[in-house]
């Protein structure tokens, strides 16, 4: 694919600064370019779910956790990445798509995408931004990386409320063979509530992947979600937002699932009313901090007005020179 929108080259020297925070090796997933209009089925180890099967195959919906993946297989590497303002906002308001990154850090984000098997956003972002969730990184400055380096787009939508229109960018890319099939992750019990119109719009562009029912507190089980992705052959996932997803992963009990964090800080204040990123404190934690990165690197990007911080939580930390 030719470069349609010019992104500045993300230099190998800058790439090297990120290396310690990226998955160790990119594993090609769904390598074959699908025929026009025909999906290449993922090579799942276990049973997989096609868009059609989702509404008829009760057996798949009844699988339990232990059936999902072989014992002792590692959870996917999860890189949490987002751009925020100086007042810790990621957008001007709910549903307001807000450009924060400079062209260089935007380019960096596409480079990071090229290093992951999948890219995940919450349904709030999918509905607000109509994101493409593809990778427009170019290794040679002329053409973007091929199909094998495109991440699998994942929409995290426990309630099944994604406004899935036929013209959604992510669906168009999948249908034209320029992007990978979309994984639409929905709670088991809500899958049947997806109406025929949205079901038809989604047809031929991806797979509905059932999530386990949340407990009474409606807490999403990231361990289950990551095991589910692992069972689909996904070894690395980049989580890009939005606010609710980021805040949930930054809560103390979920930090163990976060392999690394890469945050772009734009030199701008968005003001009150924007979408904040500020994880809730644990009940009874008083005035204790919520989380602190243990292994930290500030990236000295010379041609960008933005700051970039990369780090890991203690539980995930390895020494970085
Ligand atoms: N600056 C950046 O880097 C960046 C990146 C991405 C998005 N954004 C911005 O972020 C904003 C959207 O953020 P948002 O907070 O509204 O939406 P979001 O985090 O994308 O999605 C939130 C929704 O996803 C479901 N969900 C996600 N995580 C969940 C969890 N752990 N447990 C249960 N449900 C979960 C819930 O749906 P239900 O309520 O239906 O259960 C929740 O309402 C947009 O303005 C977008 O432009 C900014």
Image (spheres, grey):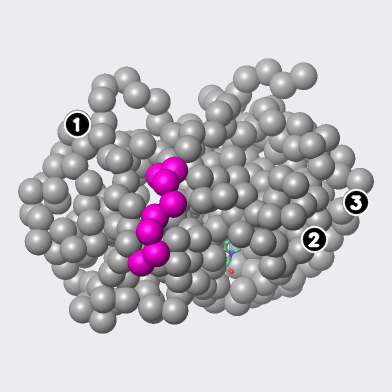
Seen from this angle, which residue lies furthest front? 35
- For label 3, the SS is loop
Secondary element under disc 2, as helix, strand or loop, is loop
Marked residue nearer the N-terminal end (1 or 2): 1
Residue 105 visible at all: no
Classify 219 as above or below 193.
above
Query: Which residue is identified by label 2?
Result: 102
- Locate residue 97, reporting x and y percent: 62, 74
Q: Please state the horizontal and vertical placement of residue 247, each as a whole percent of the image.
A: 53, 52
Which residue bears the numbered disc 3? 303
Residue 312 sits in quarter: top right
Mark 1 Cα-neighbour bin, 10 Å: few <14, some 14–19, many ≥20: few
Q: Which residue does the image show at 48% across and 58% down from the upper left?
A: 179
Out of 264 and 201, give the one closest to the viewer. Answer: 201
Closer to the camera, 272 or 117?
A: 117
In the displayed image of the protein, which residue is found farthest to the right? 302
Q: Position of residue 264 (x, y in %)?
A: 73, 51
Mostly what secondary structure, the magenta segment? loop
| Residue corresponding to mark 1 | 66
Residue 114 sits in which quadrant?
top right
Residue shown at the point (86%, 44%) measured from the top left: 301
State left or right for residue 314 relative to residue 296: left
What residue is rendered at 55% in x and 45% in y? 149
Q: Is residue 103 visible?
A: yes
């Amino acid at each position: 694919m030719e470069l349609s929108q010019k992104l500045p080259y993300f230099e190998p020297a800058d790439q090297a600064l990120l290396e310690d925070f990226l998955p160790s090796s990119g594993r090609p997933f769904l390598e074959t370019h699908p025929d026009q209009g025909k999906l290449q089925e993922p090579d799942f180890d276990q049973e997989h779910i096609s868009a059609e099967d989702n509404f008829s195959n009760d057996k798949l919906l009844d699988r339990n956790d232990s059936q999902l993946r072989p014992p002792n297989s590692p959870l996917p590497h999860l890189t949490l990445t987002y751009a925020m303002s100086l007042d810790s906002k990621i957008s001007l308001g709910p549903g307001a798509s807000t450009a924060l990154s400079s062209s260089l850090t935007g380019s960096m984000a596409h480079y990071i995408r090229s290093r992951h098997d999948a890219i995940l956003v919450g349904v709030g972002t999918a509905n607000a931004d109509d994101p493409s969730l593809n990778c427009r990184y170019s290794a040679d400055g002329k053409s973007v990386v091929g199909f094998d380096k495109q991440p699998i787009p994942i929409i995290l939508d426990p309630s099944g409320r994604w406004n899935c229109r036929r013209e959604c960018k992510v669906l168009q890319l999948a249908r034209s063979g320029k992007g990978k099939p979309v994984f639409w992750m929905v709670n088991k019990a809500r899958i049947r509530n997806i109406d025929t119109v949205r079901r038809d719009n989604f047809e031929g562009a991806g797979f509905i992947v059932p999530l386990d029912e949340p407990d009474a507190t409606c807490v999403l089980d990231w361990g289950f979600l990551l095991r589910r992705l692992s069972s689909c052959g996904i070894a690395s996932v980049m989580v890009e937002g939005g606010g609710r997803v980021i805040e949930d992963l930054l809560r103390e009990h979920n930090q163990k699932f976060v392999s690394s964090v890469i945050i772009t800080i734009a030199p701008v204040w968005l003001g009150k009313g924007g979408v904040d990123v500020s994880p809730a404190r644990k009940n009874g934690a008083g005035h204790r901090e919520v989380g602190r990165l243990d292994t930290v690197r500030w990236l000295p990007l010379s041609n960008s007005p933005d700051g970039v911080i990369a780090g890991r939580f203690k539980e995930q930390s390895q020494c970085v020179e």
